[in-house]
Image: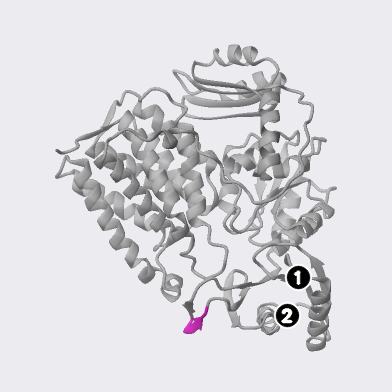
């Protein structure tokens, strides 16, 4: 029997199935790295982004497809991690924005139109779109949807044809991007999109009740790190969250000003005539009364944080697991500063270096651990400083940082640093006696003068530039590009330095040693370099980063 429309109930089920299918296959997507280094995270980022979209959607009790799509778009925006997550969030956003308020269900042409709008929104998020990526796969699928929906009303048949077309386009991505062809892989983001579409289609084919375990709240990704916990006194007892829907666009600034005296951890953001409020307060009733001035309350959630905190401690003491927000909470400073500097970094030594150089807040993150839009935004919004300089220090976090800049109430300036050395160089150029714009200009100039080297290992057999790569090989990267392959770390290190010098004839080499590299090894490495490059000044610091044996900086 043909399926000629998708209502709210079916949309809810289909998105849950889509999320589940991607989650179950995210390791496959993670493995599709251009280079076989151990930091593939595209599948994880996409999966966590969609999981938060689903979690937000579950808060909507009624089966109104517009409200469900808006909630999912909001969740995806807040949960966006990495470039792939941000692009995916924009697909959700465009899709939701195209659905009219009075729409009860989507016919085939409606669905095709909304997906096309999602693709258009995703393209806007990328300054220089590249063919052979998730954008290409999404665009081609959107065109196929429109083509099929013009001659067929059966959404299942249309999606089947669209997914098959998307797979064919995905297989062609190596012909569009040279790096994909050399690595022998298809685009990871495009593969993730196919898994989402297949999960969505599966729900349409099997419109049965979703198992209870899928309807429960989606758990956040847990980090494998032991922490010490203690019960603390809470200044505000009630975590209050609500969604307001007004007849017209809600004045976010005015609403935020009205609520700011009622507690802390305030986040007020919105899209069109819908606003979301998060606040820790002792007077949730006053928050609700103020919110009612702007529209109808669609969802309200009030939790006693003292009880939650006690339960949380008991659970964490058993599991010894910490999430991102707990990892960074002690780094947050509330003292007023005209300019606040926030850096994303991992590794105890590297984080300490950033603090010593003047970073006010360190957000735990980097390769395989990209912070979400919401995690960065909540930190920024809870500070008193009007100006924030943000150092992402990773190419896969820059787009998320730019999203935060668009949403935040503060003046956020993103220095697009792609590596730890670039971030440190930018921070060293900061002068507290200068205004924010002068500092941003100086920091942008400083980071661009650094050459970054990284030494890691291959996680799979692969090919690069005509060379065979075997699992376990030592790999040397220069500014994110694979340049050296070898079997011994020291040999790769010397060749990598020579390659870096070919790019920039600097004489100051700074090295950050990774987790597991002991002091004796670093002394031997320093002596080796000085013997081969007697005119070079070498400094080695304990970085403590995972996955990378050494991170190098040449200036």
Bounds of the magenta segment: 465-470
In the visual, does 258 lie left or right of 123?
A: right
Residue marked by disc 2 = 505
Q: Residues within 10 Å of mark 2 (few under 14, many from 20)?
A: few
Q: Residue at x 57, y 16 (%)?
A: 291
Q: Position of residue 180 (x, y in %)?
A: 43, 70
Q: Residue at x 48, y 50 (%)?
A: 46
The answer to whether residue 429 shows anywhere in this view is no
Residue marked by disc 1 = 517
Residue 506 to residue 442: above or below: below
Residue extending furthest toward the bottom: 532
The answer to whether residue 226 shows anywhere in this view is yes
Q: Secondary structure at mark 1?
A: loop
Q: Position of residue 503 (x, y in %)?
A: 66, 78
Q: Please tell me the numbered disc located at residue 544.
A: none
Q: Secondary structure at mark 2?
A: loop
- Magenta stretch encompasses residue 74: no
- Magenta stretch encompasses residue 469: yes
Residue 514 to residue 340: above or below: below
């Amino acid at each position: 029997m043909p399926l000629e429309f998708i209502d709210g109930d079916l949309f809810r089920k289909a998105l849950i199935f889509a999320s589940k299918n991607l989650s179950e296959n995210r390791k496959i997507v993670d493995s599709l790295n251009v280079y076989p280094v151990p930091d593939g995270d595209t599948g994880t980022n996409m999966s966590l982004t969609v999981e938060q979209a689903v979690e937000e959607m579950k808060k909507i009790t009624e089966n109104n497809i517009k409200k469900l799509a808006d909630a999912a778009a909001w969740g995806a925006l807040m949960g966006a991690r990495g470039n792939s997550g941000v692009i995916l969030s924009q697909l959700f956003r465009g899709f939701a924005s195209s659905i009219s308020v009075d729409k009860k269900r989507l016919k085939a042409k409606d669905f095709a139109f909304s997906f096309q709008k999602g693709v258009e929104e995703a393209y806007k998020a990328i300054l220089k779109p590249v063919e052979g990526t998730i954008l290409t796969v999404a665009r081609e699928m959107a065109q196929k949807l429109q083509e099929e929906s013009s001659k067929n009303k059966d959404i299942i048949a249309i999606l089947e044809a669209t997914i098959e077309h998307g797979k064919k386009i995905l297989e062609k991505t190596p012909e569009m991007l040279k790096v994909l062809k050399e690595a022998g892989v298809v685009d990871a983001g495009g593969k993730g999109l196919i898994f989402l579409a297949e999960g969505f289609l599966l729900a349409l084919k099997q419109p049965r009740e979703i198992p209870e375990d899928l309807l429960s709240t989606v758990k956040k990704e847990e980090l494998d790190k032991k922490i010490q916990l203690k019960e603390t006194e809470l200044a505000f007892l009630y975590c209050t969250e609500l969604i307001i829907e007004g007849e017209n666009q809600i004045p976010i600034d005015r609403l935020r000003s009205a609520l700011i005296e009622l507690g802390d951890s305030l986040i007020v953001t919105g899209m069109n005539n819908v606003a979301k409020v998060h606040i820790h307060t002792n007077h949730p009733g006053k928050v609700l009364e103020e919110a009612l001035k702007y529209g109808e309350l669609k969802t309200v959630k009030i939790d006693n944080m003292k009880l939650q905190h006690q339960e949380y401690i008991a659970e964490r003491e058993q599991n010894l697991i910490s999430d991102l927000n707990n990892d960074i909470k002690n780094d947050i400073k509330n003292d007023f500063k005209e300019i606040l500097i926030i850096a994303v970094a991992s590794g105890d030594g590297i984080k300490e270096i950033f603090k010593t150089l003047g970073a006010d807040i360190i957000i735990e993150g980097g390769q395989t651990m990209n912070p979400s839009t919401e995690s960065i935004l909540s930190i920024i919004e809870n500070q008193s400083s009007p100006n924030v300089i943000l150092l992402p220090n990773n190419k896969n976090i820059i787009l998320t940082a730019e999203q935060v800049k668009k949403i935040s109430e503060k003046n956020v300036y993103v220095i697009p640093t792609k590596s730890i050395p670039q971030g440190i160089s930018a921070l060293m150029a900061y002068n507290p006696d200068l205004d924010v714009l002068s500092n941003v200009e100086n920091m942008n100039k400083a980071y661009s003068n650094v050459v970054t080297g990284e030494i890691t290992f291959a996680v799979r057999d692969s090919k690069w530039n005509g060379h065979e790569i075997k699992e376990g090989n030592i790999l040397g990267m220069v500014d994110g590009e694979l340049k050296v392959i070898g079997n011994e770390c020291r040999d790769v290190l010397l060749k990598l330095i020579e390659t870096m010098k070919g790019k920039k004839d600097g004489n100051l080499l700074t090295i950050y040693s990774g987790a597991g590299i002991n002091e004796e090894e670093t002394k031997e490495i320093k002596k080796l370099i000085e013997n081969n490059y007697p005119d070079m000044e070498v400094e080695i610091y304990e970085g403590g980063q995972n996955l990378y044996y050494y991170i190098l900086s040449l200036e």
